[in-house]
Image (cartoon, rainbow, N blue to C red):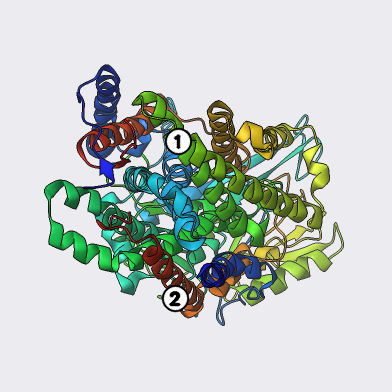
Amino acid sequence: MSQYQALGGRILTKPFMVLGLIFAISLYFMFERFVTGGMGAVSNLNGGFAWGIWVVYDVVIGTAFACGGYALAIAVYVFNKGQYHPLVRPAVLASLLGYALGGFGAFFDMGRFWQFYEIFLPWNWNFNSVMLEVGLCVATYILVLALEFSPALLEKLGHKKLLKLLNKVLFLFIALGILLPTMHQSSLGSLLIAMGHKVNPLWQVMHMQPLLALMTAILMGFSIVLFEASTVTVGFKRNSETHMLSGLGKIIVGLLIAFLVVRFGVLTFQGKLGLIFAGDFASFMFILENILFVIPLIILLSPQRRAQGSKLLIAGVCLLLAGSLYRFDAFLLTFNPGLGYNYFPSAPEIMITLGVIAFELMAYILIVKLLPVMHREEHA
Amino acid sequence: MKRRNFLKTSLGGTVSAAAALGGTVFSGTAQARANLEPAPEAVGMLFDSTLCVGCKACVTKCKQVNDMPPIIEGDHTAWDSARDLSGDTLNVIKVYQNGNRATKDAEIDGFCFEKRSCMHCVDPGCVSVCPTTSMQRNPITGIVTHHPETCIGCRNCMVGCPYNVPQFQYNEVFGQINKCQMCNQKGVERIDNGQMTGCAEVCPTGATLFGPRKLLLKEAKQRMAVKKGDIYQYPRGDISKPDNYYEKEVPDYKQHIWGEKEAGGTNVMHISSVSFDKLGMPPLSERSAPSVVEGVQHTLYSYLALPALALAGLTYTVKQNTSDHDDDDGGES
């Protein structure tokens, strides 16, 4: 008997239909974007802000939200923390959906979507390009995630032989599934280097971009596991997984301290500490962002608070906000391409992103109800 | 057993963590490459803001050569109202104004004109960031060209350009990136045919001067060396074979040739009597951003050595740790 179970239950619940409605509205704007009007008709993208929320939210932040599978894989398979194993499969599903839809987001944003395949042709490759690394690596990782998740489908369909074969080689894909996000999540930071002066000095740390991006990605990965596990516990009325989550809280503390040390160390080294208190918009955002990093640190430092589900959830949400804000700040909010350029996403642009998120949530709900994803409870 | 497990875990953990994080940390101290040097026969333009009278003949000529429609604003159909570069405008003239705008080329209470078009960087950001090699720097002439046939429209060139030069045609479903290619793109090839750029050809005052980068740089330095108010022979057209010269008093030049050194230098250089930050030029240091980012990328990914090493370490560790869990129905995921 499998350790995992499908949750079952009615599919067409009210929340599911609300999500469906949001998705349906976004389809209208997608039609406008791809068929009748083009990108300019639905978005506020312009010559200075070539990347808006489709890149920065859907891809740069969305894939960090989808790092749960990656973070857990590091804990379980690299540091041999087997006790977190029950959390892995739902996290891999969330990662698969998050990354797949990050891929869709990239497609909406692709100005010349009809020839997207040009990036996969080796004779076109520019090995100096960070974007090349991101594109190829994310595409490969989506396939790896699909393979990592496929046992759930194979169990459901009863393909015993194929399942056995897959399990024999799965370790290879797990290893790849740790390497690939390490590569492209750090590269998402490297994208900022080439933007030079357009990135605010508090975020433009040049060589250290990849390290900071990677650390926030792993932090957000663990946080999303905290968040998902707590939400699923409440939403699907399952037993609490707090005992497992408090251990994750401890890992987050270590990582968070390392991140803050590196970040402030770099700013000190580059002589930018004064900018934090400059009193302008960037300094305000920087302080806000770091408050959101420090709150979870304070919460999680105490073993008592780590044992409380509600405190873990607050810490997780704070960290997700902090990590998102870190990326929003660097890529959009304090991004300054020069005089005369402004950007705020248009309503259709936001609707398309919301539609993508709604679709992701619908797929998650559908799959955990139909396929053996959640760990079987000991006394249900 | 416990001890063995401990050793395995710490070994494997160390290897992969070191490979994963160490690579990025290492890049902090890695030697990035130097800025690229100007191409051997680099051609460019010298824009002298003090000579520009704002007639915008260059804007019109540019649209003719590149077969692009004028931007019409309101009822003003008599002239091209383009205010900035766009998918349909590769060259614009902008105006600087201050106070009562009484004196040309004065920073205070004055005005002047500034040209915006591709600077044809010596170490171009757009070329460095493009994943599909759709931006290319000609190895001989240094001209930066765009090749839409392989472009996926990721627009990294736009954010990677310090001057916001590459522009996407947002208002078309099947749009493309456009930028000045110094009139030498396929089907135009003015430079290859011994002609000069359209904008330089029609410029009545020689404010836009075409020619080899070396000669242009020399010319700019010469102008700066002349005392303010002295008479100087200003050439028009192509500096290597000027159509003609005319005499004019030398203005109060700022001692700064924009593009001599900025971010590795540019083939299109500007001189002016109003400082460049007022004319909207970006705050650039001499080091080019591509030289930094390529240093990081090549430290991490050269021959895929670090990723391969990390993968080997990870595979070993994961293999060890998955056999530890050992569940009957598999289900590692």
Label 1: which secondary element: loop
Amino acid identity at mark 1: Glu
Asked if the residue at tag 2 contacts the one at tag 1, i.e. Cβ–Cβ closer than 8 Å, the answer is no
State the residue position of label 2: B312
State the residue position of label 1: A241
Q: Nearer the viewer, residue A14 or B36?
A: A14
Amino acid identity at mark 2: Ala
| x 72%, y 60%: residue | B285
Residue B246, image quadrant: bottom right
Question: Which residue reaches farthest front?
Answer: B1
Residue A139, image quadrant: bottom left
Where's residue A115, x and y in %? 26, 56
| Chain of residue at mark 2 | B
Location of the C terminus of chain B (image quadrant): bottom left
Q: Is residue B67 left or right of residue A53?
A: left
- Vertical placement of residue A195 versus A345, above or below: below
| Chain of residue at mark 1 | A
Q: Is residue A172 left or right of residue B103?
A: left
Q: Which mark is residue B95?
A: none
